[in-house]
């Protein structure tokens, strides 16, 4: 069995409404970069990555088409570790992060889809099979919303079947943030998990002041309180503050995760197959986290991440992100009573309505 073709497609997917966070500003759409792999005997696999807005999407697609895809033609798709290593070292010098690892991520996910399909197994069971469901939360991009609209969004998450909520923060005024957090806490009650996400906006001193002010609201975690490069800063926030730290969506290698975890900078490592190196890398981060007695959470791409978290014994919460493909999925993610359920179809089970999505295709 050999890889015969690697197709790459890019789409600009519109968001249901314009959204805003503390760092990235207003977001109107996201770029979806899809990879479809086919072997000489007809086996297929599909994976994807994405970028915020339209920035970087065409660069990722070009890297895959011109540099990565030619390297895997003729390879045995079942030898995923060999292919991953080949791609990693091919782009290592020009970038061990950024578009390089985004490109690897899409290919790797497609390979795991293909391999699980060959085994006629759903991905969650093929990867380890801990459980077919995982606790999930609603993650809004809601920095710009009034408190009234924030509570309406929260009610929408509850109506979907979610029983944990995360909101965006990162303002200059900690008092204003307290007002918003208190409103949501009072709305959902004392028993549901509530998280906040700073999107890297604050420095360490501001973060420490904030978490101390937030203590009365019983937050499950504070996410990305400062820049991902500041490992020592994360350690201080994690150890000196009263609220657990979640971070990782901007860490792009297993080595960065190892350092953050080993240095005591995070309680909830937050991995993303779209920018870490795919499923191969995420599973390794899950094992590193387990060795340090940490539970793994995931960032976005809930339709695929649900299978990854369902496979491992140290799963934390699955983020149900505002960047959604629901309108283009034949079988959207099933959520009931606070849990998301992994597909039992062979492979990752994410089935896209390509005809409907085609109106947003760029190339």
Image: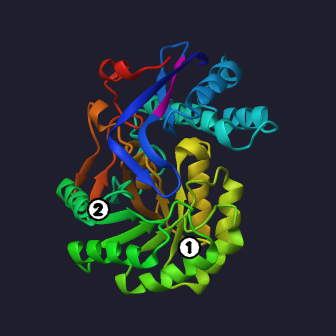
Please state the extent of the stretch shown in magenta in the rendering.
31-38
- To which residue does mark 2 refer? 146
The dot on residue 293 is 1
Quarter holding residue 216: bottom left
Q: Residue at x 53, y 49 (%)?
A: 272
Percent from the top left, x then y, of residue 330?
A: 26, 30
Residue 122 appears in the figure: yes
Q: Is residue 272 above or below residue 225?
A: above
Residue 129 appears in the figure: no
Specify few, some or many for label 1: CA neighbours under 10 Å numbering under 14, 14-19, or 20 or more: few
Q: Residue furthest left?
A: 159
Judged left or right of residue 21, residue 69 is right
Viewer-side residue, 129 vs 206: 206
Specify few, some or many for label 2: CA neighbours under 10 Å numbering under 14, 14-19, or 20 or more: few
The dot on residue 56 is none
Percent from the top left, x then y, of residue 315?
A: 45, 62
Question: Do the numbered discs 2 and 1 sit on residues whose CB atoms are within 8 Å?
Answer: no
Viewer-side residue, 265 vs 39: 265
On whether residue 191 falls in the magenta region, the answer is: no
Viewer-side residue, 14 vs 308: 14
Judged left or right of residue 285, residue 357 is left
Q: Earlier in the sequence, mark 2 or mark 1?
A: 2
Quarter holding residue 338: bottom left
Q: Residue at x 56, y 76 (%)?
A: 207
Judged left or right of residue 337, residue 298 is right
On whether residue 36 falls in the magenta region, the answer is: yes
Q: Is residue 218 above or below residue 37?
A: below
Disc 2 versus disc 1: distance between alpha carbons? 38 Å
Quarter holding residue 332: top left
Percent from the top left, x then y, of residue 26?
A: 44, 46
Percent from the top left, x then y, of residue 139?
A: 37, 57
């Amino acid at each position: 069995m050999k890889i015969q073709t690697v197709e790459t497609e890019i789409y600009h997917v519109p968001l249901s409404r314009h959204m805003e966070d503390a760092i990235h500003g207003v977001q109107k759409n996201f770029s979806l970069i899809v990879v479809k792999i086919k072997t000489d005997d007809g086996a297929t696999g599909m994976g994807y990555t994405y970028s915020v807005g339209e920035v970087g999407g065409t660069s990722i697609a070009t890297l895959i088409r011109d540099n990565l895809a030619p390297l895997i033609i003729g390879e045995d798709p079942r030898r995923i570790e060999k292919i991953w290593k080949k791609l990693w070292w091919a782009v290592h010098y020009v970038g061990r992060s950024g578009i390089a690892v985004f490109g690897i991520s899409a290919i790797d996910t497609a390979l795991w889809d293909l391999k699980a399909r060959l085994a006629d197994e759903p991905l969650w069971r093929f990867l380890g099979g801990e459980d077919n469901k995982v606790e999930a939360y609603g993650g809004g991009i809601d920095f710009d919303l009034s408190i009234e609209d924030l509570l309406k969004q929260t009610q929408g998450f509850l109506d979907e079947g979610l029983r944990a909520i995360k909101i965006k923060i990162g303002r200059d005024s900690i008092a204003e943030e307290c007002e918003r957090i208190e409103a949501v806490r009072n709305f959902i009650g004392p028993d549901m998990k509530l998280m906040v996400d700073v999107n890297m906006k604050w420095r360490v001193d501001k973060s420490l002041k904030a978490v101390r002010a937030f203590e009365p609201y019983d937050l499950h975690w504070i996410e990305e309180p400062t820049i991902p490069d500041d490992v020592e800063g994360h350690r201080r926030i994690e150890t000196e503050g009263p609220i657990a730290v979640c971070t990782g969506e901007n860490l792009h290698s297993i080595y960065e995760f190892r350092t953050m975890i080993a240095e005591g900078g995070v309680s909830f490592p937050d991995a993303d197959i779209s920018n870490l190196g795919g499923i191969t890398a995420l599973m390794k981060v899950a094992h590193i986290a387990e060795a340090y007695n940490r539970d793994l959470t995931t960032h976005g791409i809930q339709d695929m991440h649900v299978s990854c978290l369902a496979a491992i014994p140290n799963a934390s919460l699955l983020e149900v992100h505002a960047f959604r493909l629901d309108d283009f999925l034949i079988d959207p993610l099933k959520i009931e009573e606070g849990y998301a359920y992994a597909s039992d179809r062979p492979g990752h089970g994410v089935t896209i309505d390509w005809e409907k999505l085609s109106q947003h295709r760029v190339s």
